[in-house]
Amino acid sequence: MKSLNRLKVAVGQFASGYDLDANWSHIERLVNEASEQAVRLLVLPEACQVSFASKDVAEIAEHYTPVFLERLRQLVIKNNIYLVAGIVALPENRADHRVCNQLVVFNADGELMVRYNKIHPYDAFSYKESDRICSGHPDQIGIFDIGDFRFGLINCYDLRFPELARRLIDKGVNVLSVSAAWIAGQNKEAHWEILNRARAIENTAYVLASGQSPKRSCGHSMIIDPMGNILSGVGNDGLGMAVAELDYQKIISIRQENPCLENRKIK
């Protein structure tokens, strides 16, 4: 891909539910709005296709996900946009009764570039996601390129594990794309912001953090620069979108000023 050192990006926010048509309506609206603002990449939340609380996720993964992916393909072509979205997918091992919590990436030509299965199921704060969700293989990470920018995928609870972000950075990633349905609760909103900003600072990378909106989730989707500054955010509103421009030269400049990646003694 030819050199591209500036990129307009957006993070979308809404709360998905059990109604597949309603979820699609939100996705379509956000993609259309992003396209109208000349956004090149839109990042949507984890599980934006359907809530993982649905008892029908396995059936949806088998019968609806292929249809959903084709609709996404047509939507990105129509709007000439790259898209990250969270879906439910069948595992390779069909004997496993669980499903995959997956992020997919489409380019503007409708090519399905990446499928990334969440490595860390949400087994914390009284939840046990691994009862219903398969773990992705630790070596199967999600990376894609747009011009000078290399993006690495992080799915919700993955954010609490800095090892994944650092592995992505070591593969040349300079933008971390986080999709989440960050469950609300005591301290959770603070954790969401602090962890996203920490991943940006410690890796001198941009962070695009898309989360589902309240009340079940925290909202507060945001775009963060490599110094940890929030460039744009949605807050805890329902459906919304934050937009910012990534600057490749800013990454270079900050990494020269703060060469913490080069100065590492422990790898």
Image (tube, grey):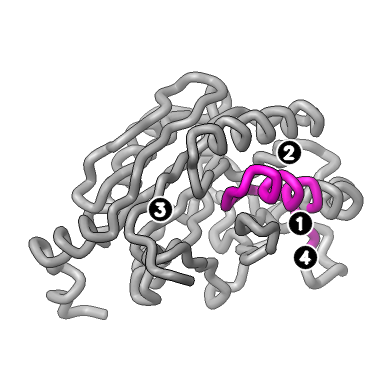
Q: Amino acid at mark 4?
A: Pro
State how far apart marks 1 and 2 are (Cα). 11 Å
Q: Earlier in the sequence, mark 1 or mark 2?
A: 2
| Magenta region, residue range | 70-90
Q: Earlier in the sequence, mark 3 or mark 1?
A: 1
Residue at 64% x, 43% y is 79
Secondary structure at numbered mark 4: loop
Closest to the camera, between mark 2 and mark 3, is 2
Does label 4 or label 2 sit earlier along the sequence? 2
Q: Which residue is mark 4?
A: 91
Query: Residue 50 got which mark?
Result: 2
In the image, is residue 149 above or below residue 81? below
Q: Could you say whether the residue bearing mark 3 is in a helix, strand or loop? A: helix
Residue contact between numbered discs 4 and 2, judged by CB atoms under 8 Å: no
Q: Quadrant of residue 149?
A: bottom left
**Marks 4/3: CA distance?**
24 Å
Which amino acid type corresponds to the residue marked 3 in the rendered image? Arg
